[in-house]
Amino acid sequence: MSTVREAEETTHEPSAARAWVAVLGGVAAGAVTIGVAELLAGLMERFGWSGGIPSPVIAVGEAFIDRTPPWLKDFAVNNFGTNDKAVLLAGIGVVLFLLSCLIGLLLRRLPVAALVGFVVLIAVAMAAVLTRPGARPADLIPTVVGGLMGLWVLHRWRGLLSVGVGRREITTERRQVLTWTMLSVVGGGLALAAGRAVSGSARAIQAARATFVAPEVQHPVQVPAGAPVDVPGITPYIVPNGQFYRIDTALQVPQVEASGWKLKVTGMVDHEVEIDWKTLLSKPMQQAMITLMCVSNEVGGSLNGNAIWTGWPVRELLKLAGPQAGADMVLSTSVDGFTAGTPIGALTDDRNALLAVAMNGKALPVEHGYPVRLVVPGLYGYVSATKWLTQLKVTTYAKDQGYWIPRGWSAMGPVKISSRIDVPRDGRSVSPGADGTVPIAGVAWDQHTGVSGVQVRIDDGPWQSAKLGEQATVDAWRQWVLHWPATKGRHTATVRAVDAKGQVQISAEAPPPPNGSTGLHSVTFTVS
Ligand SMILES: Nc1nc2c(c(=O)[nH]1)N[C@H]1C(S)=C(S)[C@@H](COP(=O)(O)O)O[C@H]1N2
Ligand SMILES: [Mo]
């Protein structure tokens, strides 16, 4: 038995090489391919030579996101929340690693299959790069050069395998294999890190953002002193930019330089209009406090936030273009291909639908749409709040659809009235204050309609009216608090809001798809 095995191991046949050597070859080729591609992609982005997404990894990830079936997307958001992007990137990493191992294994017995498989993967990556919005042929350079380098590594490994590396004794070949693997993996890793570090005109954009001075407005928003309710642990009435929820389909945040930014108004208009950044800033800007809201928010979820936005009303721009009769929708497009279909009325009526350039007095954070995004009071973000905005097409619902509509969400997305308990947090233990009460507090919203009341029920008790913070505008949420004379033990608090017309928030439960969740939020806590 052992003699047979030794005989096999010393044969100078390709198949004599151990599987691990072959696997290392695949891993080395994968590391070199990705490292080289990401380094080149980073440099291209850095120097502005790319049009779309030159990184094959990010391009494949974004193409994947666009094709994610709704059930998988819901699963990802429910289980990973806003970490879904990190999880997707980790998943891509694992899949690439396994594919590399597989290609290595094939290299041993079926080298042609290994090479063909590798070329197919590169072709898939090339297709993903080419189909990203704004892609140019040059965006293929990183994938092609990385792929050629990977092929070269595979070819070299073929050579190593054919001299029979893998015998049990330490041989020079074996040392060579390990050295090559180390060099490839470490070099590939460093190249990847370097590529990501230099990528984007990120630094230039951050510098431009830092020196940006939010435009002066005639009527700055004053937060009424009575609007915030002062209870420790409640969501800030104005959510700081760094804490604001973020939802988008971009695996890599689009880096758009304001100096090159343009917005086109096309479609059913009398005259197409195009404005650039300078022109936009020269327009009379307005400020508005608007609570933004994601349709994916579950009852009690935190995918919403209130901010003061500065921008030029969209209706003024549309007026310049002259929408034609029959148009009922405006399809807004982002530089990354995302689209939202907004009822034209919401953009032409007197509400503060803005082409926003500032958020809470600062340039828009890059993740929130720098340099320009749409903000429309009263509508969920998926039908209105396009970030990295580049185009407005005046059109009809019959002709066009926003990004999420074919993915199972309603074409119309008016915000539904809802409310949330922020304190006490679910499952916490609290002790009453000196006056014997426990504050139960949170936020309630019904954008562009307004909240007129908030009621809280403890266990199976009667609905009690909470104290409301002042209503600054119907477009923003209201904070509320009930100082409950607490009794010891476990309790459940439930909240419901009442709208401006006296209509009470419904208790029937509905999941977010297709047009927003309903149901009442409750928390269970212990008073000690
Ligand atoms: N370009 C782009 N804009 C987008 C999205 C997107 O995926 N891409 N998502 C929309 C959705 S679903 C929401 S809820 C809001 C969230 O805005 P925020 O990330 O600034 O909170 O952005 C909207 N604008
Ligand atoms: Mo959303």
Image: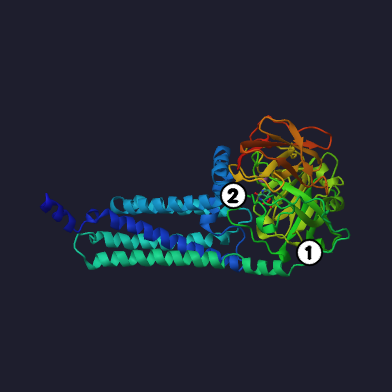
Measured along the vertical axis of the image, is residue 141 above or below residue 353?
A: below
Measured as percent of width and height from the top left, residue 126 is found at 51, 54
Q: Earlier in the sequence, mark 2 or mark 1?
A: 2
Locate residue 24 relative to residue 66 in the image: left or right: left
Q: Which residue is mark 1?
A: 214
What's the residue at 63%, 50% (across, down)? 248
Q: Is residue 401 visible?
A: no
Q: Nearer the viewer, residue 225 or 212?
A: 225
Q: Is residue 357 above or below residue 88?
A: below
Residue 513 place in picture, x, y as percent: 64, 36
Tag 1: Cα neighbours inside 10 Å, few (<14), some, or many (≥20)? Answer: many
| Location of the C terminus (image quadrant) | top right
Circles 2 and 1: CB atoms closer than 8 Å: no
Image spot of residue 494 (x, y percent): 68, 36
- Name the one closer to the observer, 218 or 118: 218
Amino acid under disc 2:
Thr
Cβ of disc 1 within 8 Å of ligand 1? no
164 left or right of 226 in image? left
Question: As shown in the figure, which amino acid type bears the numbered disc 1?
Answer: Ala
* Mark 1, secondary structure of its residue: loop
